[in-house]
Amino acid sequence: MIPVMEASRLITADDVAPLARGCAVLGTGGGGDVASGALAARRAVEQYGGVPLIALGDLSPDDVILPLGMIGAPTVGHEMIHGDDQPALILREVERLLGRRPAAVMSSEIGGSNGVHPVGWAARLGLPLLDADAMGRAFPEVQMVSMHVAGLAPTVIVLADVVGNVTAVRPVDGAWAERIARAVCVAAGSSALMADYILRAAEARGALIEGTVSRAIALGRAVDGAADPLGALTAELGARNLLNGKITDLRRETTGGFARGAAVVTGVGGDRGRIITLEIQNENLVAVEDGRVLAMVPDLITVVDTQTASAVQTEGLRYGQRISVLAWPCDPLWRTPRGIEVAGPRAFGYDLDYVPVEDIP
Amino acid sequence: MIPVMEASRLITADDVAPLARGCAVLGTGGGGDVASGALAARRAVEQYGGVPLIALGDLSPDDVILPLGMIGAPTVGHEMIHGDDQPALILREVERLLGRRPAAVMSSEIGGSNGVHPVGWAARLGLPLLDADAMGRAFPEVQMVSMHVAGLAPTVIVLADVVGNVTAVRPVDGAWAERIARAVCVAAGSSALMADYILRAAEARGALIEGTVSRAIALGRAVDGAADPLGALTAELGARNLLNGKITDLRRETTGGFARGAAVVTGVGGDRGRIITLEIQNENLVAVEDGRVLAMVPDLITVVDTQTASAVQTEGLRYGQRISVLAWPCDPLWRTPRGIEVAGPRAFGYDLDYVPVEDIP
């Protein structure tokens, strides 16, 4: 019997909360305000209906995929402008530029609010959502995307700000893309919706991280009503629990639009006597114990509440909080030489050779 | 006998120097480095051939006019990038966005370097130059253009920076256009070529200031070898000579990308005993004597060398220099209520009601 392709499923309002929980875990401490993203997505789905979640294989080679993400500081209520909205402005501009209506929305970044917002954007636009993203996690810079690692050139970046200005940039390379997009975003009140690395389905294979939306929903569902939420999440992630402990020191500063800092976690219970330091640049990037690195970017490091297994974002860290530090492997794409170059420890200024988390004794 | 429309003339390398002299006069102290503009234009004309100078009436209603101007700090040698160039990048993007090749280049700003550069840009692009501009002089801000005064909406602004990045902005209004274009320009090294208020010939009548290229050339030619250059220029402009004098005090500061300051001119010869102060914001905006305003923006005030009648730009003013201060009427468009609102004295922060220069006793 010939295997039948699984029918695309519909993301409903009931899926939004588990998706948001999963996206928060994949955000590794960063990724913006997940709760507002969930609120906006839920409202849009209630108003415009559920969103078909499709696989890359469901698209025809010429179909255009529209990757979307907020850059800057996303805020509830900022999403709507003058009865029109940012996703519609971007869609219209992309149609103008490409002469073709995109066939699906994709999350640029599954980690954090940008993982859950696209459900709402797809609902508004009446488009399906592709079960994929460009990071498999959260990253702070425009060029830290799978398409760049795969060698695709940025063609045109389209930004729509909260005021309604629409800007299309054809950058000479990814670094200029980042620089100009950031400048436009700052000029427009530090928040904009962005479509970057708009691509055809034919060039997407190997250039996206597939299955991440359904994975995020599965992560959220795994802890739902579990007797041992932390155990359930760790198992679903295939993660190591580096430490159960509490925050005993916290240093954070915001420079150049990035939150930098470190958190010291002191072990409790069976981990008493151990101390782990987390190096943070928006996301948790490196976990160190006694000068020994236990996990490093691009592998994922997330702080969760020990009782509920809810992800704790960097800005939510509090002195004395009981937390667990989980670490697990990133997508294989990030472990290629080019992946390491784009988003390995040295891309963030750490003088470390990348070692996969599962290879660290 | 039916009058025959004058055949379009060709701008040759020999026209560049007089054009540059005229543009410097119309620059009212601002408008960038006219000498580099002349050098670049002359080279382009020598390489690509002369540029037909056409009138608005020579265009068909659907023809697209491409207004071009540098924003930021233009520098020689920055114009060319990677064998391609900024005008070609802009032309290509405009063709993509409009689905139509522009029929003519136009200077956005006849005053200063942006009045002479377009000859070179048109030569490179193989397009004629329209005998018109959007200011009839120089102004510092993106929205201070005739199309805005005439009530045309900015549609899309296209910027190409020296690196080769191309950015297209659809602003919600002129103020946002200014803000975003400036941000992109600063991100790209503070210099970019910009196409703004791209328009069809059908909507251009009354929304452009016509005849300004040929006028600038005529101004330059008028002083060429004249026995009395100052008298010849004053007559050709229909200007008042407010004062023959010397610079006795000079105050300049650069804030927010603008040169602000004042120059005190003390009369010599027949004007001995008189003192005029020029208020400057990039351009010469107000001339005051004993608390009495003698001329004010949008009318034109230019400082020229008394002997040669060459325009002296703000950055070229020197203590003790023998100069004459000329003032003459702006285009009638700037004297409409909306023209005064956009670029009258209050638009520059002066608490003055506009009085035409020729009505001041």
Image (cartoon, coloured by chain):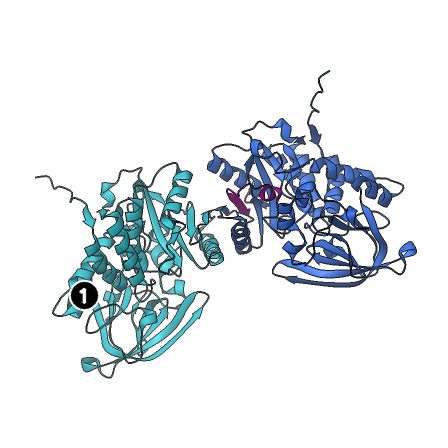
Chain colours: A blue, B cyan
Image coordinates of residue A80 in percent, x first then y, are 59, 44
The residue singled out by tag 1 in the image is B233
Q: Using residue A321 as the reference point, say whether residue A8 is left or right of it.
A: left
Image coordinates of residue A202 in percent, x first then y, are 57, 31
Image coordinates of residue A221 in percent, x first then y, are 80, 38
- Please tell me which residue lies in front, A106 or B262: A106
- Please tell me which residue lies in front, B94 or A202: A202
Q: Using residue A121 as the reference point, say whether residue B111 is left or right of it.
A: left
Q: What is the span of residues highlighted in magenta in the rendered image?
A: A144-160
Whether residue A173 appears in magenta in the rendering, the answer is no
- Secondary structure category for the residue under label 1: helix
Residue furthest toward the top? A1
Total labels drawn: 1
Give the amino acid at mark 1: Leu
A20 in relation to A247, above or below: above
Rendering quarter of residue B255 = bottom left
> Dot 1 falls on which chain?
B
Residue B196 seen anywhere in this rendered image of the structure: no
B150 in relation to A214, above or below: below
Q: Using residue A121 as the reference point, say whether residue B301 is left or right of it.
A: left
Whether residue A153 appears in magenta in the rendering, the answer is yes
